[in-house]
Amino acid sequence: MNIRAARRFQNDVRVFQSRIAFSVVLLLLAVAALVVRLVYLQIVGHEHYATLSQDNRVKIAPLPPTRGVIYDRNGEVLADNVPSYSLELVPERIDDLDATLAELQTLLGLSDEDVRRFRKLRSQHKSFESIPLKMRLDEEQIARFAVKQPFFPGVQIAVRMIRTYPYAELTAHAVGYVSRISEADLKTLDPSLYSGTYHIGKSGIEKTYETLLHGRTGHQELETNVQGRSIGVLNTVPPIPGADLRLSLDITLQRAAVDALGDYNGAVVAMEPATGRVLAFVSKPSFDPNPFVYGIPKADYDRLQASPDRPLYNRALRGVYPPGSTVKPFEGLAGLEVGDLAADRKVSCPGYFQLPNSSHQYRDWRKGGHGAVDLKSAITQSCDVYFYKLALSLGIDKLSEFMGRFGFGTRTGIDIPGELPGVYPSKEWKKKRSKYPWFPGETVITGIGQGYVGVTPVQLARATAILANRGRVVTPRLLDGVQGGAGAAPEERRREELAIAPEHWDTVIQAMIDVVHSPRGTAKSIAGGLAYHVAGKTGTAQVFSVAQGQKYRESEVSKEMRDHALFIAFAPAEQPRIAVAVIAEHGGHGGSVAAPVARAVMERYLSGSAP
Protein backbone atom coordinates (compact mmCIF):
# COMPACT_ATOMS: atom_id res chain seq x y z
CA MET A 1 0.00 0.00 0.00
CA ASN A 2 1.53 3.29 -1.01
CA ILE A 3 1.61 6.35 1.21
CA ARG A 4 -1.31 8.09 -0.59
CA ALA A 5 -3.58 5.11 -0.13
CA ALA A 6 -2.68 4.85 3.58
CA ARG A 7 -3.54 8.49 4.18
CA ARG A 8 -6.88 8.10 2.40
CA PHE A 9 -7.68 5.09 4.58
CA GLN A 10 -6.83 7.01 7.76
CA ASN A 11 -9.09 9.89 6.67
CA ASP A 12 -11.95 7.52 6.02
CA VAL A 13 -11.50 5.99 9.48
CA ARG A 14 -11.57 9.43 11.15
CA VAL A 15 -14.75 10.42 9.21
CA PHE A 16 -16.41 7.17 10.17
CA GLN A 17 -15.42 7.59 13.82
CA SER A 18 -16.72 11.18 13.80
CA ARG A 19 -20.03 10.05 12.40
CA ILE A 20 -20.26 7.30 14.96
CA ALA A 21 -19.53 9.81 17.75
CA PHE A 22 -22.13 12.29 16.40
CA SER A 23 -24.73 9.54 16.13
CA VAL A 24 -24.05 8.42 19.70
CA VAL A 25 -24.37 12.01 20.98
CA LEU A 26 -27.59 12.49 19.01
CA LEU A 27 -28.94 9.23 20.35
CA LEU A 28 -28.04 10.21 23.91
CA LEU A 29 -29.79 13.58 23.49
CA ALA A 30 -32.89 11.88 22.14
CA VAL A 31 -32.91 9.45 25.03
CA ALA A 32 -32.48 12.35 27.47
CA ALA A 33 -35.36 14.25 25.87
CA LEU A 34 -37.53 11.15 26.05
CA VAL A 35 -36.69 10.69 29.71
CA VAL A 36 -37.48 14.36 30.44
CA ARG A 37 -40.80 14.05 28.57
CA LEU A 38 -41.69 10.87 30.46
CA VAL A 39 -40.89 12.56 33.76
CA TYR A 40 -43.12 15.51 32.77
CA LEU A 41 -46.01 13.33 31.66
CA GLN A 42 -45.83 10.97 34.62
CA ILE A 43 -45.08 13.43 37.41
CA VAL A 44 -45.38 17.13 36.52
CA GLY A 45 -48.33 16.94 34.12
CA HIS A 46 -50.05 13.92 35.58
CA GLU A 47 -53.13 15.75 36.91
CA HIS A 48 -53.71 17.70 33.71
CA TYR A 49 -53.48 14.73 31.36
CA ALA A 50 -55.47 12.50 33.66
CA THR A 51 -58.28 15.08 33.39
CA LEU A 52 -58.05 15.10 29.60
CA SER A 53 -58.19 11.33 29.57
CA GLN A 54 -61.27 11.42 31.77
CA ASP A 55 -62.91 13.89 29.37
CA ASN A 56 -62.37 11.42 26.55
CA ARG A 57 -64.39 8.93 28.56
CA VAL A 58 -66.93 11.20 30.32
CA LYS A 59 -69.25 13.79 28.80
CA ILE A 60 -71.48 16.27 30.60
CA ALA A 61 -75.10 16.32 29.43
CA PRO A 62 -77.22 19.26 30.65
CA LEU A 63 -80.60 18.59 32.26
CA PRO A 64 -82.83 21.61 31.60
CA PRO A 65 -85.27 22.52 34.37
CA THR A 66 -89.04 22.51 33.98
CA ARG A 67 -90.36 26.06 33.64
CA GLY A 68 -92.64 27.28 36.40
CA VAL A 69 -96.40 27.37 35.85
CA ILE A 70 -98.30 30.68 35.94
CA TYR A 71 -101.73 30.84 37.61
CA ASP A 72 -104.36 33.53 38.03
CA ARG A 73 -105.61 34.60 41.46
CA ASN A 74 -108.15 31.74 41.54
CA GLY A 75 -105.78 28.98 40.47
CA GLU A 76 -106.62 28.95 36.76
CA VAL A 77 -103.58 27.97 34.67
CA LEU A 78 -102.44 30.81 32.40
CA ALA A 79 -99.12 29.31 31.26
CA ASP A 80 -98.34 25.60 31.42
CA ASN A 81 -95.89 23.01 30.11
CA VAL A 82 -96.99 20.09 27.94
CA PRO A 83 -94.93 17.19 26.55
CA SER A 84 -94.08 17.54 22.90
CA TYR A 85 -92.19 15.22 20.55
CA SER A 86 -89.19 16.91 19.01
CA LEU A 87 -86.91 15.74 16.17
CA GLU A 88 -83.34 16.43 17.29
CA LEU A 89 -79.89 16.07 15.74
CA VAL A 90 -76.42 15.74 17.28
CA PRO A 91 -74.19 17.25 14.54
CA GLU A 92 -70.94 15.54 15.60
CA ARG A 93 -72.52 12.11 15.09
CA ILE A 94 -73.66 12.85 11.53
CA ASP A 95 -71.19 12.35 8.68
CA ASP A 96 -73.03 14.41 6.06
CA LEU A 97 -75.29 16.90 7.78
CA ASP A 98 -76.55 18.59 4.59
CA ALA A 99 -77.58 15.28 3.05
CA THR A 100 -79.27 14.19 6.27
CA LEU A 101 -81.25 17.42 6.46
CA ALA A 102 -82.38 17.03 2.85
CA GLU A 103 -83.52 13.44 3.45
CA LEU A 104 -85.39 14.36 6.62
CA GLN A 105 -87.04 17.27 4.87
CA THR A 106 -88.36 14.94 2.18
CA LEU A 107 -89.33 12.16 4.58
CA LEU A 108 -91.22 14.31 7.09
CA GLY A 109 -92.37 17.20 4.93
CA LEU A 110 -90.31 19.78 6.81
CA SER A 111 -90.28 23.38 5.63
CA ASP A 112 -87.31 25.45 4.56
CA GLU A 113 -88.04 27.59 7.63
CA ASP A 114 -87.48 24.55 9.88
CA VAL A 115 -84.08 23.94 8.30
CA ARG A 116 -83.15 27.61 8.49
CA ARG A 117 -83.99 27.75 12.21
CA PHE A 118 -81.96 24.58 12.82
CA ARG A 119 -78.90 26.03 11.13
CA LYS A 120 -79.24 29.17 13.23
CA LEU A 121 -79.52 27.13 16.42
CA ARG A 122 -76.53 25.01 15.41
CA SER A 123 -74.37 28.12 15.18
CA GLN A 124 -75.32 28.93 18.77
CA HIS A 125 -74.59 25.50 20.29
CA LYS A 126 -71.77 22.99 20.50
CA SER A 127 -71.62 20.13 18.02
CA PHE A 128 -72.16 17.45 20.69
CA GLU A 129 -75.43 19.02 21.91
CA SER A 130 -78.80 17.74 20.79
CA ILE A 131 -80.40 20.45 18.66
CA PRO A 132 -84.11 20.43 17.71
CA LEU A 133 -84.94 20.47 14.02
CA LYS A 134 -88.72 20.18 14.31
CA MET A 135 -90.81 20.61 17.45
CA ARG A 136 -94.33 19.33 17.91
CA LEU A 137 -94.15 16.34 15.56
CA ASP A 138 -97.51 14.85 14.69
CA GLU A 139 -98.27 11.12 14.89
CA GLU A 140 -97.72 10.54 11.18
CA GLN A 141 -94.29 12.18 11.25
CA ILE A 142 -93.31 10.12 14.32
CA ALA A 143 -94.37 6.89 12.60
CA ARG A 144 -92.50 7.71 9.38
CA PHE A 145 -89.28 8.45 11.23
CA ALA A 146 -89.56 5.40 13.50
CA VAL A 147 -89.43 3.10 10.43
CA LYS A 148 -86.32 4.85 9.04
CA GLN A 149 -84.53 5.68 12.28
CA PRO A 150 -81.71 3.05 11.86
CA PHE A 151 -80.65 4.88 8.67
CA PHE A 152 -80.24 8.19 10.53
CA PRO A 153 -77.42 7.92 13.08
CA GLY A 154 -77.27 10.99 15.31
CA VAL A 155 -80.97 11.73 14.81
CA GLN A 156 -83.55 10.99 17.49
CA ILE A 157 -87.01 11.81 18.73
CA ALA A 158 -86.95 13.43 22.17
CA VAL A 159 -89.73 14.44 24.52
CA ARG A 160 -89.50 18.05 25.68
CA MET A 161 -91.79 20.11 27.87
CA ILE A 162 -93.09 22.96 25.73
CA ARG A 163 -94.84 26.13 26.91
CA THR A 164 -98.52 26.52 26.17
CA TYR A 165 -101.01 29.31 26.87
CA PRO A 166 -104.55 27.94 27.38
CA TYR A 167 -106.21 31.37 27.18
CA ALA A 168 -104.17 32.49 24.14
CA GLU A 169 -105.32 35.99 23.07
CA LEU A 170 -106.96 36.68 26.41
CA THR A 171 -103.68 36.89 28.32
CA ALA A 172 -101.04 37.54 25.63
CA HIS A 173 -100.26 41.13 26.61
CA ALA A 174 -100.15 40.44 30.35
CA VAL A 175 -98.55 37.00 30.66
CA GLY A 176 -96.44 37.43 27.52
CA TYR A 177 -94.75 34.45 25.88
CA VAL A 178 -91.50 32.52 25.55
CA SER A 179 -89.65 32.05 22.29
CA ARG A 180 -86.37 30.64 21.01
CA ILE A 181 -83.19 32.10 22.45
CA SER A 182 -81.72 34.55 19.95
CA GLU A 183 -78.15 35.60 19.29
CA ALA A 184 -78.86 38.85 21.12
CA ASP A 185 -80.06 36.85 24.15
CA LEU A 186 -76.86 34.76 24.14
CA LYS A 187 -74.78 37.90 24.66
CA THR A 188 -76.40 38.53 28.04
CA LEU A 189 -77.17 34.99 29.27
CA ASP A 190 -74.96 32.83 31.46
CA PRO A 191 -74.31 29.72 29.28
CA SER A 192 -74.08 27.48 32.32
CA LEU A 193 -77.60 28.44 33.41
CA TYR A 194 -79.19 28.00 29.97
CA SER A 195 -77.30 24.96 28.69
CA GLY A 196 -79.86 22.62 27.13
CA THR A 197 -82.54 25.33 27.20
CA TYR A 198 -83.88 26.71 23.93
CA HIS A 199 -86.56 29.15 25.10
CA ILE A 200 -86.60 32.33 27.14
CA GLY A 201 -89.28 34.83 28.21
CA LYS A 202 -89.68 37.51 25.55
CA SER A 203 -92.49 39.69 26.90
CA GLY A 204 -94.88 40.25 29.78
CA ILE A 205 -94.61 38.34 33.04
CA GLU A 206 -92.61 35.65 31.25
CA LYS A 207 -89.83 38.16 30.65
CA THR A 208 -89.99 40.09 33.92
CA TYR A 209 -89.72 36.98 36.09
CA GLU A 210 -87.55 34.90 33.76
CA THR A 211 -85.04 34.11 36.54
CA LEU A 212 -87.76 32.77 38.84
CA LEU A 213 -89.60 30.85 36.13
CA HIS A 214 -86.56 29.26 34.49
CA GLY A 215 -85.08 27.42 37.46
CA ARG A 216 -81.53 25.99 37.53
CA THR A 217 -80.00 23.58 35.05
CA GLY A 218 -78.76 20.20 36.29
CA HIS A 219 -76.44 17.75 34.53
CA GLN A 220 -75.50 14.12 34.01
CA GLU A 221 -71.98 12.73 33.76
CA LEU A 222 -72.19 10.15 30.97
CA GLU A 223 -69.64 7.40 30.35
CA THR A 224 -69.05 7.12 26.59
CA ASN A 225 -67.28 4.72 24.24
CA VAL A 226 -64.76 5.67 21.56
CA GLN A 227 -67.60 6.63 19.19
CA GLY A 228 -68.94 9.06 21.79
CA ARG A 229 -72.08 7.02 22.50
CA SER A 230 -73.33 6.88 26.06
CA ILE A 231 -72.85 3.53 27.79
CA GLY A 232 -73.78 4.56 31.33
CA VAL A 233 -74.51 7.34 33.81
CA LEU A 234 -71.75 8.07 36.33
CA ASN A 235 -73.40 10.91 38.27
CA THR A 236 -76.54 13.06 38.17
CA VAL A 237 -77.15 16.55 39.53
CA PRO A 238 -80.91 17.08 39.14
CA PRO A 239 -82.23 20.40 37.87
CA ILE A 240 -84.19 22.74 40.13
CA PRO A 241 -87.61 23.44 38.56
CA GLY A 242 -88.68 27.03 38.06
CA ALA A 243 -90.98 28.67 40.59
CA ASP A 244 -94.73 28.67 40.07
CA LEU A 245 -96.19 32.18 39.98
CA ARG A 246 -99.62 33.28 41.14
CA LEU A 247 -100.86 36.48 39.54
CA SER A 248 -103.45 38.91 40.85
CA LEU A 249 -105.15 38.71 37.45
CA ASP A 250 -108.70 37.36 37.43
CA ILE A 251 -109.29 35.51 34.15
CA THR A 252 -113.09 35.76 34.43
CA LEU A 253 -112.77 39.53 34.89
CA GLN A 254 -110.34 39.64 31.98
CA ARG A 255 -112.88 37.93 29.74
CA ALA A 256 -115.68 40.20 30.96
CA ALA A 257 -113.61 43.27 30.02
CA VAL A 258 -112.84 41.94 26.55
CA ASP A 259 -116.50 41.06 25.96
CA ALA A 260 -117.64 44.47 27.22
CA LEU A 261 -115.41 46.29 24.72
CA GLY A 262 -117.34 44.53 21.99
CA ASP A 263 -116.27 45.69 18.54
CA TYR A 264 -114.07 48.49 19.86
CA ASN A 265 -110.30 48.31 20.08
CA GLY A 266 -108.82 49.75 23.22
CA ALA A 267 -107.70 48.88 26.72
CA VAL A 268 -109.10 48.13 30.16
CA VAL A 269 -107.02 48.12 33.36
CA ALA A 270 -108.60 47.28 36.71
CA MET A 271 -106.80 47.40 40.07
CA GLU A 272 -107.32 46.90 43.77
CA PRO A 273 -106.79 50.45 45.06
CA ALA A 274 -105.56 49.37 48.47
CA THR A 275 -102.78 47.11 47.18
CA GLY A 276 -102.09 47.94 43.54
CA ARG A 277 -102.86 44.37 42.49
CA VAL A 278 -103.91 44.31 38.86
CA LEU A 279 -107.22 42.49 38.39
CA ALA A 280 -107.66 42.92 34.64
CA PHE A 281 -105.14 43.96 32.01
CA VAL A 282 -106.68 44.06 28.55
CA SER A 283 -105.27 45.28 25.26
CA LYS A 284 -107.58 44.72 22.31
CA PRO A 285 -107.09 43.35 19.72
CA SER A 286 -104.67 40.72 20.89
CA PHE A 287 -102.87 37.72 19.35
CA ASP A 288 -102.26 34.03 19.99
CA PRO A 289 -98.83 33.66 21.65
CA ASN A 290 -98.62 29.88 21.16
CA PRO A 291 -97.08 29.96 17.64
CA PHE A 292 -94.23 32.12 18.98
CA VAL A 293 -93.16 29.23 21.24
CA TYR A 294 -92.51 26.82 18.35
CA GLY A 295 -91.35 29.51 15.93
CA ILE A 296 -94.02 31.47 14.12
CA PRO A 297 -93.74 31.32 10.30
CA LYS A 298 -92.46 34.56 8.82
CA ALA A 299 -95.58 35.02 6.67
CA ASP A 300 -97.82 34.82 9.74
CA TYR A 301 -95.63 37.23 11.68
CA ASP A 302 -95.59 39.68 8.78
CA ARG A 303 -99.40 39.59 8.71
CA LEU A 304 -99.53 40.47 12.41
CA GLN A 305 -97.05 43.28 11.88
CA ALA A 306 -98.88 44.68 8.87
CA SER A 307 -102.37 44.54 10.41
CA PRO A 308 -103.88 48.04 10.72
CA ASP A 309 -105.36 46.98 14.08
CA ARG A 310 -101.83 46.37 15.46
CA PRO A 311 -102.62 43.29 17.60
CA LEU A 312 -98.98 43.03 18.78
CA TYR A 313 -99.16 46.55 20.24
CA ASN A 314 -99.73 46.57 24.01
CA ARG A 315 -102.22 49.42 24.29
CA ALA A 316 -102.62 49.11 28.06
CA LEU A 317 -98.89 49.60 28.61
CA ARG A 318 -97.66 51.58 25.61
CA GLY A 319 -100.73 53.24 24.13
CA VAL A 320 -100.41 56.98 24.78
CA TYR A 321 -103.79 58.73 24.47
CA PRO A 322 -105.12 62.21 25.21
CA PRO A 323 -106.95 61.70 28.53
CA GLY A 324 -109.64 64.26 27.76
CA SER A 325 -111.90 65.19 30.65
CA THR A 326 -110.77 62.28 32.85
CA VAL A 327 -108.08 64.64 34.22
CA LYS A 328 -110.62 67.15 35.55
CA PRO A 329 -110.98 65.65 39.06
CA PHE A 330 -107.20 65.78 39.50
CA GLU A 331 -107.03 69.34 38.22
CA GLY A 332 -109.88 70.25 40.54
CA LEU A 333 -107.79 68.99 43.44
CA ALA A 334 -104.89 71.08 42.14
CA GLY A 335 -107.10 74.17 42.22
CA LEU A 336 -108.19 73.44 45.78
CA GLU A 337 -104.73 72.57 47.07
CA VAL A 338 -102.31 74.90 45.32
CA GLY A 339 -104.52 77.46 43.60
CA ASP A 340 -106.53 78.82 46.54
CA LEU A 341 -109.70 77.89 44.69
CA ALA A 342 -112.90 78.04 46.68
CA ALA A 343 -114.99 74.97 45.88
CA ASP A 344 -118.23 76.97 45.90
CA ARG A 345 -116.98 79.83 43.72
CA LYS A 346 -119.15 80.17 40.62
CA VAL A 347 -117.72 80.51 37.12
CA SER A 348 -119.76 81.59 34.13
CA CYS A 349 -119.81 79.19 31.18
CA PRO A 350 -121.35 80.75 28.05
CA GLY A 351 -120.23 77.84 25.89
CA TYR A 352 -116.80 79.18 24.96
CA PHE A 353 -113.70 80.85 26.39
CA GLN A 354 -111.45 83.54 24.93
CA LEU A 355 -108.00 84.69 26.00
CA PRO A 356 -107.61 88.45 26.48
CA ASN A 357 -107.00 90.29 23.21
CA SER A 358 -107.77 87.16 21.18
CA SER A 359 -110.70 86.34 18.93
CA HIS A 360 -110.07 82.59 19.10
CA GLN A 361 -112.83 80.73 20.91
CA TYR A 362 -112.09 77.62 22.96
CA ARG A 363 -115.41 75.89 22.82
CA ASP A 364 -117.26 73.91 25.46
CA TRP A 365 -118.68 70.52 24.50
CA ARG A 366 -122.17 71.93 25.19
CA LYS A 367 -122.93 74.59 22.58
CA GLY A 368 -125.02 76.81 24.85
CA GLY A 369 -122.74 76.40 27.84
CA HIS A 370 -123.52 75.37 31.41
CA GLY A 371 -124.31 78.73 32.96
CA ALA A 372 -122.85 79.43 36.41
CA VAL A 373 -121.00 76.37 37.78
CA ASP A 374 -118.90 75.62 40.83
CA LEU A 375 -116.23 72.91 41.03
CA LYS A 376 -118.57 70.03 41.86
CA SER A 377 -121.03 70.84 39.09
CA ALA A 378 -118.15 71.48 36.67
CA ILE A 379 -116.86 67.95 37.26
CA THR A 380 -120.34 66.42 37.26
CA GLN A 381 -121.31 68.05 33.95
CA SER A 382 -117.73 68.07 32.59
CA CYS A 383 -117.75 71.80 31.92
CA ASP A 384 -114.78 72.64 29.68
CA VAL A 385 -114.86 76.41 30.22
CA TYR A 386 -114.44 76.01 33.98
CA PHE A 387 -111.25 74.01 33.48
CA TYR A 388 -109.94 76.30 30.73
CA LYS A 389 -110.02 79.10 33.29
CA LEU A 390 -108.72 76.94 36.14
CA ALA A 391 -105.69 75.77 34.16
CA LEU A 392 -104.88 79.33 33.10
CA SER A 393 -105.14 80.62 36.67
CA LEU A 394 -102.83 77.88 37.99
CA GLY A 395 -100.26 78.14 35.20
CA ILE A 396 -98.76 75.18 33.39
CA ASP A 397 -95.79 74.63 35.70
CA LYS A 398 -97.81 74.54 38.90
CA LEU A 399 -100.38 72.29 37.23
CA SER A 400 -97.69 69.98 35.84
CA GLU A 401 -96.00 69.62 39.22
CA PHE A 402 -99.26 68.73 40.97
CA MET A 403 -100.35 66.23 38.31
CA GLY A 404 -96.96 64.59 38.61
CA ARG A 405 -97.87 63.62 42.16
CA PHE A 406 -100.50 61.29 40.70
CA GLY A 407 -98.00 59.78 38.29
CA PHE A 408 -98.91 61.67 35.13
CA GLY A 409 -95.87 61.89 32.87
CA THR A 410 -93.98 59.06 34.64
CA ARG A 411 -93.93 55.27 34.45
CA THR A 412 -96.02 53.47 37.04
CA GLY A 413 -93.42 50.75 37.66
CA ILE A 414 -95.79 47.91 36.78
CA ASP A 415 -94.01 44.54 36.54
CA ILE A 416 -94.37 44.23 32.75
CA PRO A 417 -91.48 45.47 30.60
CA GLY A 418 -91.81 48.13 27.92
CA GLU A 419 -94.00 50.69 29.70
CA LEU A 420 -94.08 54.24 28.28
CA PRO A 421 -94.20 57.27 30.62
CA GLY A 422 -96.77 59.37 28.78
CA VAL A 423 -96.53 63.18 28.85
CA TYR A 424 -97.75 65.94 31.13
CA PRO A 425 -96.07 69.06 29.73
CA SER A 426 -94.37 72.03 31.36
CA LYS A 427 -92.45 75.03 30.07
CA GLU A 428 -89.17 73.20 30.64
CA TRP A 429 -90.51 70.12 28.84
CA LYS A 430 -91.36 72.16 25.76
CA LYS A 431 -88.09 74.08 25.87
CA LYS A 432 -86.17 70.82 25.48
CA ARG A 433 -88.21 69.80 22.45
CA SER A 434 -89.04 73.00 20.59
CA LYS A 435 -87.56 76.34 19.66
CA TYR A 436 -90.88 78.03 20.48
CA PRO A 437 -91.88 79.30 23.94
CA TRP A 438 -94.89 78.07 25.89
CA PHE A 439 -98.11 79.80 24.82
CA PRO A 440 -101.13 80.57 27.05
CA GLY A 441 -103.41 78.73 24.64
CA GLU A 442 -101.46 75.54 25.29
CA THR A 443 -102.22 75.89 29.00
CA VAL A 444 -105.91 76.34 28.18
CA ILE A 445 -106.25 73.08 26.23
CA THR A 446 -104.10 71.21 28.76
CA GLY A 447 -106.92 71.95 31.23
CA ILE A 448 -109.21 69.54 29.37
CA GLY A 449 -106.58 66.84 28.76
CA GLN A 450 -105.76 67.78 25.18
CA GLY A 451 -102.71 69.28 23.46
CA TYR A 452 -99.44 67.68 24.52
CA VAL A 453 -100.99 65.62 27.32
CA GLY A 454 -100.75 61.87 26.81
CA VAL A 455 -101.44 59.02 29.25
CA THR A 456 -101.33 55.25 29.13
CA PRO A 457 -104.32 53.22 30.38
CA VAL A 458 -102.27 51.69 33.21
CA GLN A 459 -101.14 55.17 34.22
CA LEU A 460 -104.73 56.39 34.27
CA ALA A 461 -105.82 53.37 36.33
CA ARG A 462 -103.09 53.99 38.87
CA ALA A 463 -104.01 57.68 39.20
CA THR A 464 -107.63 56.61 39.75
CA ALA A 465 -106.52 54.18 42.45
CA ILE A 466 -104.60 56.96 44.22
CA LEU A 467 -107.74 59.08 44.08
CA ALA A 468 -109.79 56.19 45.50
CA ASN A 469 -107.19 55.80 48.28
CA ARG A 470 -107.42 59.53 49.09
CA GLY A 471 -103.72 59.98 48.46
CA ARG A 472 -102.10 56.64 49.24
CA VAL A 473 -99.81 55.87 46.31
CA VAL A 474 -99.59 52.27 45.10
CA THR A 475 -97.59 50.58 42.36
CA PRO A 476 -99.50 48.36 39.92
CA ARG A 477 -98.38 44.76 40.20
CA LEU A 478 -99.43 41.44 38.67
CA LEU A 479 -97.24 39.08 40.69
CA ASP A 480 -99.12 37.99 43.81
CA GLY A 481 -97.16 34.98 45.05
CA VAL A 482 -94.23 32.64 44.39
CA GLN A 483 -94.14 28.93 45.17
CA GLY A 484 -91.03 26.74 44.94
CA GLY A 485 -88.02 27.47 42.76
CA ALA A 486 -84.62 28.76 43.76
CA GLY A 487 -85.31 32.51 43.84
CA ALA A 488 -87.31 34.92 45.93
CA ALA A 489 -90.10 37.32 44.99
CA PRO A 490 -89.12 40.99 44.76
CA GLU A 491 -89.89 43.07 47.81
CA GLU A 492 -92.92 45.35 47.79
CA ARG A 493 -92.13 49.02 47.42
CA ARG A 494 -92.69 51.51 50.23
CA ARG A 495 -95.99 53.33 49.83
CA GLU A 496 -96.25 57.10 49.86
CA GLU A 497 -99.05 59.39 50.96
CA LEU A 498 -100.10 62.61 49.21
CA ALA A 499 -100.71 65.38 51.72
CA ILE A 500 -104.08 66.78 50.62
CA ALA A 501 -106.77 68.22 52.90
CA PRO A 502 -109.60 65.73 53.69
CA GLU A 503 -112.29 68.24 52.71
CA HIS A 504 -110.73 68.58 49.26
CA TRP A 505 -110.92 64.81 48.73
CA ASP A 506 -114.56 64.94 49.87
CA THR A 507 -115.43 67.65 47.34
CA VAL A 508 -113.89 65.94 44.33
CA ILE A 509 -115.03 62.40 45.16
CA GLN A 510 -118.60 63.56 45.77
CA ALA A 511 -118.51 65.28 42.39
CA MET A 512 -117.37 62.00 40.79
CA ILE A 513 -120.25 60.17 42.50
CA ASP A 514 -122.59 62.74 40.98
CA VAL A 515 -121.10 62.02 37.53
CA VAL A 516 -122.81 58.62 37.77
CA HIS A 517 -125.71 59.12 40.16
CA SER A 518 -126.86 62.69 39.51
CA PRO A 519 -129.49 63.47 36.83
CA ARG A 520 -126.96 65.91 35.35
CA GLY A 521 -124.04 63.48 35.43
CA THR A 522 -122.35 62.61 32.14
CA ALA A 523 -122.36 58.88 33.07
CA LYS A 524 -125.89 58.70 34.52
CA SER A 525 -126.80 56.02 31.97
CA ILE A 526 -124.92 53.32 33.95
CA ALA A 527 -126.47 54.09 37.35
CA GLY A 528 -129.64 52.04 36.96
CA GLY A 529 -129.73 48.92 39.14
CA LEU A 530 -126.42 49.53 40.89
CA ALA A 531 -126.38 48.32 44.49
CA TYR A 532 -123.48 50.60 45.41
CA HIS A 533 -122.15 54.05 44.60
CA VAL A 534 -119.66 54.47 41.76
CA ALA A 535 -117.34 57.47 41.56
CA GLY A 536 -116.42 58.10 37.95
CA LYS A 537 -115.42 60.57 35.27
CA THR A 538 -116.09 60.48 31.56
CA GLY A 539 -113.71 61.67 28.88
CA THR A 540 -113.84 62.28 25.15
CA ALA A 541 -110.48 62.80 23.47
CA GLN A 542 -110.19 64.42 20.07
CA VAL A 543 -108.24 62.54 17.41
CA PHE A 544 -108.03 65.65 15.22
CA SER A 545 -108.68 69.37 15.70
CA VAL A 546 -111.87 71.03 14.48
CA ALA A 547 -111.30 74.41 12.84
CA GLN A 548 -112.93 77.60 14.11
CA GLY A 549 -116.47 77.97 12.85
CA GLN A 550 -116.83 74.27 12.05
CA LYS A 551 -118.79 71.69 13.99
CA TYR A 552 -117.74 68.15 14.73
CA ARG A 553 -120.33 65.70 13.41
CA GLU A 554 -119.52 62.10 14.21
CA SER A 555 -121.68 60.73 11.40
CA GLU A 556 -119.68 62.70 8.84
CA VAL A 557 -116.18 61.46 9.75
CA SER A 558 -114.60 58.07 9.20
CA LYS A 559 -114.40 55.67 12.14
CA GLU A 560 -110.62 56.12 12.30
CA MET A 561 -111.05 59.86 12.91
CA ARG A 562 -113.75 59.68 15.57
CA ASP A 563 -113.01 60.73 19.15
CA HIS A 564 -111.74 58.21 21.70
CA ALA A 565 -114.11 57.36 24.57
CA LEU A 566 -112.66 57.21 28.10
CA PHE A 567 -113.94 56.50 31.57
CA ILE A 568 -112.32 56.16 34.99
CA ALA A 569 -114.13 54.91 38.08
CA PHE A 570 -113.80 53.26 41.48
CA ALA A 571 -116.36 51.43 43.58
CA PRO A 572 -117.87 51.21 46.07
CA ALA A 573 -117.17 54.92 46.39
CA GLU A 574 -117.18 54.87 50.20
CA GLN A 575 -114.87 51.83 50.54
CA PRO A 576 -113.21 51.26 47.16
CA ARG A 577 -112.38 47.69 46.16
CA ILE A 578 -111.77 48.22 42.47
CA ALA A 579 -110.48 51.07 40.28
CA VAL A 580 -110.94 50.93 36.51
CA ALA A 581 -109.70 52.84 33.47
CA VAL A 582 -111.26 52.24 30.06
CA ILE A 583 -110.28 53.53 26.63
CA ALA A 584 -112.42 52.61 23.63
CA GLU A 585 -110.66 53.79 20.50
CA HIS A 586 -112.89 55.94 18.26
CA GLY A 587 -115.80 55.16 20.57
CA GLY A 588 -117.01 58.75 20.50
CA HIS A 589 -118.49 59.41 23.94
CA GLY A 590 -117.13 58.27 27.28
CA GLY A 591 -120.54 58.20 28.95
CA SER A 592 -122.26 56.04 26.35
CA VAL A 593 -119.40 53.73 25.28
CA ALA A 594 -116.58 53.54 27.85
CA ALA A 595 -118.69 53.87 31.02
CA PRO A 596 -120.77 50.71 30.31
CA VAL A 597 -117.53 48.76 29.85
CA ALA A 598 -116.33 49.88 33.29
CA ARG A 599 -119.68 49.02 34.84
CA ALA A 600 -119.55 45.49 33.38
CA VAL A 601 -116.10 44.99 34.90
CA MET A 602 -117.11 46.38 38.30
CA GLU A 603 -120.31 44.34 38.41
CA ARG A 604 -118.44 41.16 37.55
CA TYR A 605 -115.92 41.76 40.30
CA LEU A 606 -118.17 43.10 43.04
CA SER A 607 -121.28 40.99 42.52
CA GLY A 608 -120.01 38.12 40.36
CA SER A 609 -122.27 38.97 37.44
CA ALA A 610 -122.24 41.36 34.52
CA PRO A 611 -125.27 43.48 33.56
Image (cartoon, helix red, strand yellow):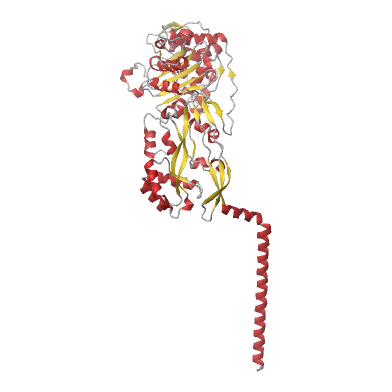
Q: Is residue 260 left or right of residue 504?
A: left
Q: Is residue 254 above or below residue 122?
A: above
Occupied quadrant, residue 602: top left
Which residue extends farthest left?
Answer: 556
Depth order, front residue of 237/348: 237
**How many labels, in total?**
0
Whole-percent x, y for residue 372 in the image: 44, 5
Compared to residue 204, the image places residue 138 above or below, namely below
Depth check, front residue: 149 or 359: 149
The x and y percentages for residue 69 are 50, 31
One can see residue 477 in this view: yes
110 is higher (above) or lower (below) than 68? below
Residue 425 visible (yes or no): no
Q: Quadrant of the C terminus?
A: top left
Q: Nearer the viewer, residue 155 or 36?
A: 155
Residue 54 percent location from the top left of the image: 60, 53
Quarter holding the N terminus?
Answer: bottom right
Residue 105 shown left or right of residue 72 in the figure: left
Q: At x 57% / y 53%, what residue is drawn?
A: 57
> Which residue is outermost to the bottom?
2
Q: Is residue 327 left or right of residue 18?
A: left
Q: Position of residue 239 (x, y in %)?
A: 56, 39
